[in-house]
């Protein structure tokens, strides 16, 4: 469960960091938005190193499902556009896939 909490915190940091750049480049906000954006992306990267996994690639792959689900929550709550059925189905499949990648028994 600690990995799940780390992934959730990493997703918040990454999405907030990326959105800061989106705001600067797409919403014509001040370049100063990049400062918290960079901080968010650094926090994201550091958090991923804290997941209990022997391999970076497996950590990143399993994080993908969490990122998709968190992005849809951002879409809904920060941008005011509720996810549709396709969004929810895709996110559900991704989260299940991420859980399998992260917690499946390993022979190595």
Image (spheres, rainbow, N blue to C red):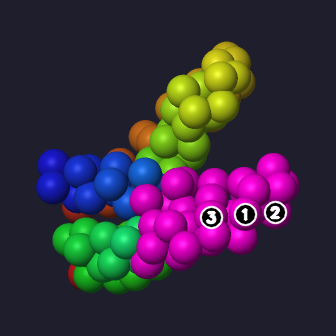
Task: Tell me if I can see residue 104 in this picture.
Answer: no
**On the image, numbered disc 2 is attached to which residue?**
25
| Mark whose residue sits in front, 2 or 3 | 3
The residue drawn where x is 58% and y is 33% is 78
Judge whether residue 15 is colored magenta.
yes
Residue 85: quadrant of the picture:
top right
Q: In this view, does 40 lie to the left or right of 5?
A: right
Horizontally, is 71 left or right of 104 in the view?
A: right
Q: Where is residue 37 in the image (x, y as percent from the top left)?
A: 55, 67
Whether label 1 touches label 3, CB < 8 Å = yes
Secondary structure of the residue carrying tag 2 is helix
- Which residue is tagged 3? 33
The CA span between labels 1 and 3 is 6 Å
Q: Distance between the residues labelled 1 and 2?
A: 9 Å
Question: Vertical placement of 82 versus 60: above or below?
Answer: above
- Element type where label 1 sits in the image: loop
Q: Which residue is at 66% across, 31% downward? A: 79
Q: Do the residues labelled 1 and 2 touch (CB within 8 Å)?
A: no
Neighbourhood count class around disc 2 (C-alpha, 10 Å): few under 14, some 14–19, many 20 upward? some
Is residue 18 found inside the magenta-colored segment of the image?
yes
């Amino acid at each position: 469960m600690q990995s799940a909490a780390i992934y959730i915190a990493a997703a918040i940091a990454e999405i907030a960091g990326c959105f800061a750049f989106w705001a600067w480049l797409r919403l014509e906000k001040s370049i100063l938005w990049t400062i918290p954006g960079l901080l968010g992306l650094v926090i994201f990267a550091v958090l991923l190193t804290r997941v209990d996994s022997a391999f970076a690639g497996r950590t990143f792959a399993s994080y993908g499902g969490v990122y998709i689900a968190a992005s849809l929550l951002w879409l809904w709550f920060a941008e005011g556009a509720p996810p549709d059925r396709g969004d929810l189905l895709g996110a559900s499949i991704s989260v299940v896939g991420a859980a399998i990648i992260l917690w499946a028994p390993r022979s190595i």
